[in-house]
Amino acid sequence: MGVGAFFGLGLLGPVQIGYRANKHYYQHEYHLSESAGTGIKGEGVSTSFESGILLPTIFNIFSLAASSVYFPPRPDGPENKMNFKGGSVSSISFNPNNYTVIGIGMNLSSAWGDWV
């Protein structure tokens, strides 16, 4: 779920900004090859919040995008847990990383002389 805005910024062209909440579902299943039907299953859920900006046509040639993802602490602790069934491990705690992604691209229409 998210919200965004789109507006023009002079020579740089259009700008899109946005914010959204993401739900991440993790699942893991492991079976031993020599004993079919036995193994462990694990699952967990975490939430992240993402904010980003997109400049789709800078000077009609390039596109630029940046997005930052933040995993907030949970009420029961900063880590998320994956719970397991069927093995000797009942749960594993993990701390999701916060990260930023930056990308640059070329407008194919400009690069190929309006061929595309």
Image (cartoon, grey):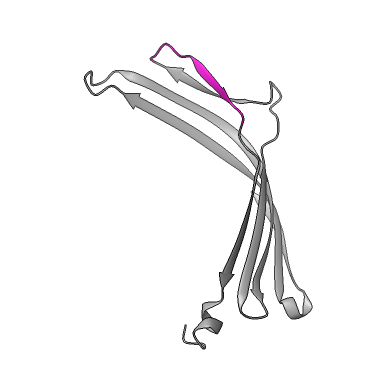
Residue at image coords 69%, 22% = 77
Whether residue 87 is in magenta: the answer is yes
Q: 67 and 47: which one is in front?
A: 67
Where residue 25 sits in the image (x, y, percent)? Answer: 52, 35
* Dominant secondary structure, magenta: loop
Residue 63 drawn above or below residue 22: below
* Residue found at the very far top of the displayed protein: 88
* Residue found at the very far right of the displayed protein: 10
Where residue 83 sits in the image (x, y, percent)? Answer: 50, 20
Residue at image coords 42%, 17% = 85
Where residue 104 sits in the image (x, y, percent)? Answer: 60, 66
Q: Could you tell whether 85 is left or right of 53 in the image? A: left
Residue at image coords 28%, 21% = 32
Residue 44 drawn above or below residue 98: above
Q: Which portion, as a residue range, is magenta? A: 86-95
Where residue 89 sits in the image (x, y, percent)? Answer: 45, 14
Whether residue 96 is in magenta: the answer is no
